[in-house]
Image (spheres, rainbow, N blue to C red):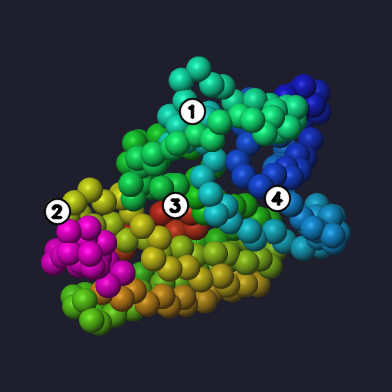
Amino acid sequence: MKRAVTLNPHTVVIVNSGGGIKMTDWSEQAAAIVYAWYPGQTGFRALAEVLSGEINPSGKLPITIEKRFEDSPGAGYLPAGEKLYTGWEPDNNMAHPVYQIDYKESVFVGYRWFEAKKIQPLYAFGHGLSYSKFEYSDLKISPAIIRQDSRVTVEFKVTNTSSVEGAEVAQLYVHDTEASVPRPEKELKGFSKITLKPGESRVVRIRVAGRDLGFWDSTAHDWKTEPGEFQILVGGASDQIALKPFC
């Protein structure tokens, strides 16, 4: 792939995969990358519609794609003396022992791991491009103080600033500024997908319950919401936060 994108700067790469793959060596040279996953029986028709511009792509990554496997929390699970294989032959080795794996990342799963470790991924959770451009503004939070048994309404405006109709997945994250236990830098608490015509704006409302601000207390075996200050963050991806006042 690296040779192909080097020879032709207009190369569009279609990725058919069930998860992340190594793209660091060539991703910046590709004209575009379409993550098609496993498209199914008629998926390639949809792919043709996206490539031809008949349909404006609007998907967002439900995973984080690292620059290198060593950045992933899964890198440390490989037993000593073992190595990853890239072929198909070992699949027939049914006598290979089953690994006993202890997952140690706790609540820092996915994008939470990369943010906690200050590791910049290749493509962040929630990332996704389209033929449209969107702008976020006018964030409002009501009420500013909530209880565990109540809700807060987060309201903001999304505007399509391009000349192409498109859909955007607006994402809402919450950051606990001070906690008695280790917590992620931020956690996804809601999202909304909206379709906007060129120049059109729309107000998006997402409700967050008081319980959504809590965490699982392993001692009490119940959810716990501590009093304190929480920050609301809104944007088009986990690394593209456009609005973030305090509430």
What amino acid is found at the position of numbered circle 3 in the picture?
Ser
Q: Cα distance, mark 3 to mark 1? A: 28 Å
Please say whether residue 167 is visible from this viewpoint: yes
Q: Earlier in the sequence, mark 4 or mark 3?
A: 4
Residue in the picture at 56% in, 70% down:
193
Outermost residue to the bottom: 150
Viewer-side residue, 97 vs 4: 97
Q: Which tag is nearer the camera, tag 3 or tag 1?
A: 1
The answer to whether 212 is drawn above or below residue 56 in the figure is below
Please say whether residue 23 is visible from this viewpoint: no
Q: Which residue is mark 1?
A: 78
At label 4, counting other C-alpha atoms closer than 10 Å, the crowd grade (few under 14, some 14-19, many 20 or more) is some
Q: Secondary structure at mark 3?
A: loop
Segment colored magenta: 211-229
Q: Residue 133, image x and y in percent?
A: 59, 58
Q: Secondary structure at mark 2?
A: loop
Q: Is residue 186 left or right of residue 62?
A: left
The image quarter containing residue 59 is bottom right
Tell me the quadrant of the picture where the C terminus can be found: bottom left
Q: Earlier in the sequence, mark 2 or mark 3?
A: 2
